[in-house]
């Protein structure tokens, strides 16, 4: 489905078979990194659950994620 959306959105007309696998791996890594940092922020605040505030703190505290996500 992602490949179809990329073609419909005029991001690309041709796409290799490995491109979608690579894109999925990048998205998985970004999710892992954000959730790991958010979990650390929750532990720092002595909370057992991660809430949106912890995700915001995690993104803003990491230089590269902050730049990537437009902070």
Image (cartoon, rainbow, N blue to C red):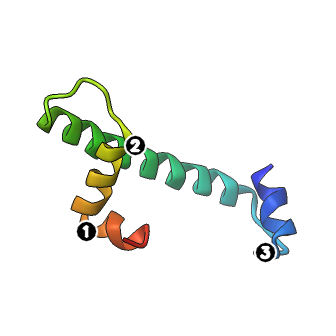
Q: Residue at coordinates 17% horizontally, 32% vertically from top-left?
A: 43
Q: Residue at coordinates 42% horizontally, 73% vertically from top-left?
A: 70
Which mark is first along the chain, 3 or 2? 3
Label 1 Cα crowd, 10 Å radius (few <14 / some 14-19 / many 20+): few
**Vertical relation: 70 (above or below) 2:** below
Q: Position of residue 14 (x, y in %)?
A: 83, 72
- Give the quadrant of the C terminus: bottom left
Which numbered marker is on residue 9? none
Which numbered marker is on residue 63? 1
At mark 3, the secondary structure is loop
Mark 1 and mark 3: Cα distance apart in space:
30 Å
Decide which of 45, 7 is in the foreground and name it.
45
Q: Quadrant of residue 59?
A: bottom left
Residue under label 3, please give it: 12
Q: Position of residue 21 (x, y in %)?
A: 64, 51
Residue under label 2, please give it: 32
Q: Position of residue 33 (x, y in %)?
A: 35, 48
Count every numbered label the image shows and give the total: 3
Decide which of 19, 41 is in the foreground and name it.
41
Q: Residue at coordinates 35% horizontally, 64% vertically from top-left?
A: 65
**Left or right of 22 on screen, residue 32:** left
**Vertical relation: 67 (above or below) 17:** below
**Left or right of 28 on screen, residue 12:** right
Image depth: mark 2 or mark 3 in front: 2
Image depth: mark 1 or mark 2 in front: 1
Q: Residue at coordinates 87% horizontally, 67% vertically from top-left?
A: 8
Which mark is first along the chain, 2 or 1? 2
């Amino acid at each position: 489905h992602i490949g179809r959306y990329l073609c419909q959105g005029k991001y690309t007309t041709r796409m290799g078979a490995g491109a979608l696998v690579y894109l999925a791996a990048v998205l998985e890594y970004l999710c892992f990194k954000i959730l790991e940092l958010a979990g650390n922020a929750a532990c720092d605040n002595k909370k057992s659950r991660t809430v949106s505030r912890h995700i915001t703190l995690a993104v803003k505290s990491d230089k590269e994620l902050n730049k990537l996500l437009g902070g």
